[in-house]
Image: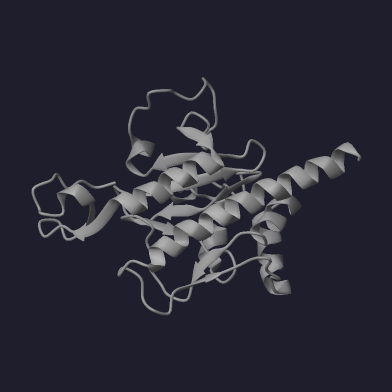
Amino acid sequence: MPETAQSDLEHEDRIEAIAALLTQWYTLQLLSTLHPLDTKISQPPHTPSPSLLSSWKTAGMSNLVMETLKQLPYLCGAEKKELAPFTRPLNYLDDDFAAEVWKDPFGLSEGGEKVQGYLGTCIPLTYCAGEEYGWLLLLDLHTNEIYEISNNAQTQTQTRRPPKGAPKYYYQHYPHNPAPETLKSWINKTKQLLWVPDPSTGIWMQQEKDDWNGSGKVFAV
């Protein structure tokens, strides 16, 4: 088998495994009371409309990224879906905002910089919906790893700093692990934690199931 064909098959197998784990994670979300009844999972393979494909190309997505997006499941059917407090999944099928996040997930353009599509072969699976909390989960198609980037971590001193002279959008100093391992970790978090509203702040917080009696510490993600 030619090397290119073998590589394509390996990529397809990796994405199929990631899609299965995302489906499991999304299914757990649907079992909670945080999502409207019309929320559903749209399963791959998808056939994007010509206009959607055009918008992806205009955003600067490579063929590898676009083909991968066709093979991922998406939560759809309702707005403001949260996988965790201030952490929302991206639906690339019918949400123009998803392409905007892909072009500039770190908000560099908000500072007046002209940036677009600097992620290359990375795909944001989620985005931060809050100013201080939330998680950007960034899937790297070349390494099959997911970078876990909290919103407040972007403004704090990192344990591991980026290389000297690295561009502002450099992200490889953030924590990252194999994609299956990372998604399984979030699935377990969803199973073990309960989202509860914090009366003092009015935002969703996490509470361990063992502490449902109210005696445990409640903390933001």
Q: Whole-percent x and y of residue 194?
A: 26, 56
Residue 63 versus residue 215: which sits nearer the camera? 215
Observer able to see residue 106: no
Residue farthest to the right?
2
Outermost residue toward the top in this view: 164
Whole-percent x, y for residue 177 in the image: 51, 34
Q: Residue at x 66, y 44 (%)?
A: 121
The quadrant where residue 149 appears: top left
Residue 85: where, in percent of width, then height? Answer: 31, 55
At 47% from the left and 45% from the top, the residue drawn is: 184
Residue 159 vertical position relative to residue 85 in the rendered view, above or below: above
**Above/below status of 49 relative to 109:** below
Position of 49 compared to 89: left or right? right
Which residue is at the front of the view, 108 or 149? 149
Direction from residue 183 to residue 115 in the image, left or right: right
Q: Give left or right: position of 181 versus 29.
A: right
Q: Nearer the viewer, residue 208 or 99?
A: 208
**Residue drawn 44% across the image and 74% down it:** 39
* Residue farthest toward the bottom in the current orientation of the protein: 38
Question: Image point 52% across, 56% down: which residue?
Answer: 22
